[in-house]
Amino acid sequence: MYRIVESREIAPAVKLIRILAPEIARKAQPGQFVILRVDAMGERIPLTLADWNITEGTITLVFLEVGVSTRKLGELKEGDAILDLLGPLGNPTDVRNYGTVCIVGGGVGIAAAYPIARALKRARNKVISIIGARTAKLLIFEEEMRRCSDEVHISTDDGTKGYKGFVSDVLRKLLQEGYGFDMVYAVGPAVMMRAVAEVTRPYNIKTIASLNPIMVDGMGMCGACRVTVGGKTMFACVNGPEFDAHKVDFTELIRRQMAFIQEERMALELWEANKRGDE
Amino acid sequence: MNKWNRFKAVPIPKQPPQVRIYNFNEVALGYSEEQALMEAERCLQCANPQCVLGCPVEIDIPTFIRLIKEGKFREAIVKIKEKNNLPAICGRVCPQEDQCQKYCVLSKRGDPVQIGRLERFLADWEREHNVEIPEKKPSTGKCVAVVGSGPAGLTVAGDLAKLGHEVVIFEALHEPGGVLMYGIPEFRLPKSIVQAEIEYIKRLGVTIKTNILVGRLYTVQELLSDEGFDAVFIGTGAGPPIFMGIPGENLCGIYSANEFLIRVNLMRSYLFPRWDTPIKVGDRVAVIGAGNVAMDASRCALRLGAKEVHIVYRRSRTEMPARKEEIENAEEEGIIFDFLTLPVAYHGDESGWVKKMECIRMQLTEPDETGRRRPVPIEGSNFMMDIDTVIVAIGRRPNPLIQQTTPGLRVAEDGTIIVDENMQTSIKGVYAGGDIVTGEATVISAMGAGKKAAKSIHKYLMGNK
Ligand SMILES: Cc1cc2nc3c(=O)[nH]c(=O)nc-3n(C[C@H](O)[C@H](O)[C@H](O)COP(=O)(O)OP(=O)(O)OC[C@H]3O[C@@H](n4cnc5c(N)ncnc54)[C@H](O)[C@@H]3O)c2cc1C
Ligand code: SF4
Ligand code: FES
């Protein structure tokens, strides 16, 4: 059992939890993720590390409550525990001095972007961050990103904060204004990462995307997470999760992410109905 | 009741096919005491028993069968457990037809003694009549780390614990058991039985730590230097599924057998939505390959509601690598076998779901120098099959993480770990065995490797005092 030492809502339906896992905290590196299971009947869910603290022995996860599994996880309070936690998984980000880097985070992806921005800042890069959400209320981790960025640009789809539009629009604008980036890092919804890749492609800027396909074991044994990169099949959990965004087949990724959408909806309806019954 | 006949095996009761395709309960129901006695009676008690030569762990087969005849079930199971820590599992999944039973003298004139079924009978009898824990040797003060909790790891761990060593198994998944837990389906090997066998290993004093991926959380070197272990055994088995690399293979609805079976067995998707992990099986399923894994996957698909399940195999019936018994079970259940057929591409709909499988017909060549008949495509014989689910079961590679994170570990070209005759790797104090050394093999060969490694590790530790 892995104890939860903090749980709070940081935006509507967006939860932050901190879990006691000293060994994982000790080994964690930017760009890595964990797989957890809430209870004995639970799914294995992959979540990117949003932070970790070696002294306290904790890891921080941020997630959107979308399906049964994340709803169950979101219901847990401080002092509760989850049954299983495996990590750190995946290859760490290649942190070095690139020069000027642009970190693009969308939605809960901003939390995943944070440790990467921080590490790149520590590696003496100039860090320009672009973070965005559907609406101002859903914008998370702004403070954290400000702490490790030289500039933070914000966008919301509805214009309630910052630029009205997508993070990829802001990126395009910056490039047109003459910003020069030696590396662009994108993490967020697949459609967003695809848009970012399309913006940087004509500029030939090295662009990394942290992919989030469906996973089961997360250790290379099932191939549920396979993605096509440069025409080759890769297992995102062990070959990634980061890949050259210009080579990723995002259309396939988006389709594969939806593979169980009907089942997920059905399960959620059932779960909600059961909950109503309980009350 | 059947009449007793020296040359005819006592049949094992099974769930009838038309019933069992609607449930995940065990297919073979096991011998009753009476049936076990009848079957044991057939054994000739050979002075020079051939069966034992076919057993990878050298169980004293005639003696345990004699003990059954005498009604001494407790003594009989103790006899087996001298050599085999996991008899309830072996009795169910070992390919006895290629091992002990193949060499049984009776097979020259009729059915061999059903050694596997008798082994299973005893193990099940013991589980119902209280499992005895053998005496342990006094503690040696030595610690061994075992990586992976499949049959190889469980065997090493059990044997070393009995010898008085402290043993910790590190397993990456959330449940121990390896393939026994995540691969082989409930209807062939009930998970409660695997759990009971694991419980026995724990009662021998072994600690099992799940959710620990060695190579990431600790490296093998760190286990030796920082975590205080005196020796390490690597039993990480096979993992990454092989795909064919043909167009359309990443369409939705195409699973590797490993994904499909992990969902069904480890994650209990057949109980979705009571359990949270979903699975989707369409009406027409194609399973590519014809080994045990393919049989398991096809029979799971049937039980999950598929109307038609095809085994698609590029060679012919005689070359199928699966156990005969499992092929028969699959046929009884209505699995369709498409021989000499090779998929060449998949075609999907607008939303990226597989809808059609393009195949080509094959023919077998004359046997080559090695005596094997190679399948070659028949030019222009392409045709389409309507399908909405595909399960690719053409093999798996060794799990690579330990090899990648252990400098100095000698690895063969195919990714398996190289060991000497004592199961020691190129690093002193680090041993390996099971599928990670042999490539995909069997439960019993993994156990045999575990036995051998335990002996070597014991010697190494005691010489090291
Ligand atoms: C579907 C299926 C059906 C089969 N049917 C039969 C059958 O009927 N009869 C038969 O004899 N054989 C059968 N086999 C083959 C048999 O199961 C294997 O040969 C046997 O399980 C190998 O045992 P093992 O201990 O080497 O590895 P495994 O059983 O594969 O166990 C390895 C374990 O190590 C863990 N692991 C891997 N990497 C790490 C790491 N870095 N850190 C920690 N843990 C790790 C894995 O999670 C796994 O639990 C079947 C295999 C499959 C897949
Ligand atoms: S070879 Fe057959 S008959 Fe002879 S001892 Fe072994 S099981 Fe019995
Ligand atoms: S999640 Fe199973 S191989 Fe990546």
Image (spheres, coloured by chain):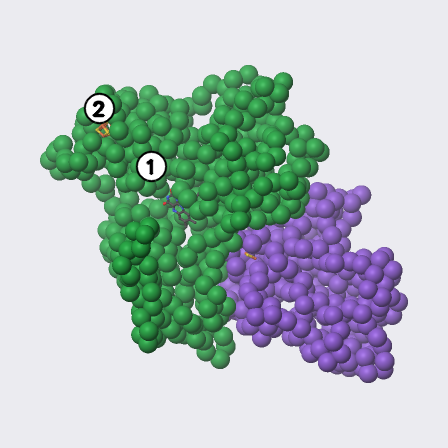
Chain colours: A purple, B green
Q: CA distance from mark 2 to mark 1?
A: 21 Å
Q: Position of residue B412 (x, y in %)?
A: 53, 45
Query: In this rendering, is residue A172 above or below B79?
Result: below
Q: Chain of mark 2?
A: B
- In this rendering, position of residue B184 left or right of residue B22: right
Q: Position of residue B356 (x, y in %)?
A: 39, 74
Q: Residue at x 29, y 61 (%)?
A: B365
Residue of label 2: B46
Q: Nearer the viewer, mark 2 or mark 1?
A: 2
Crowdedness of circle 1 by 10 Å Cα count: few (<14), some, many (20+)?
many
The residue closer to the viewer here, A264 or B326, is B326
The residue closer to the viewer here, B430 or A167, is B430
Residue of label 1: B91
Q: Position of residue A166 (x, y in %)?
A: 73, 78
Q: Tag 1: residue type?
A: Gly
Q: Residue at x 55, y 38 (%)?
A: B234
- In this rendering, position of residue A44 left or right of residue A59: left
Ligand 2 within 8 A of label 2's CB?
Answer: yes
Helix, strand or loop status at disc 2:
loop
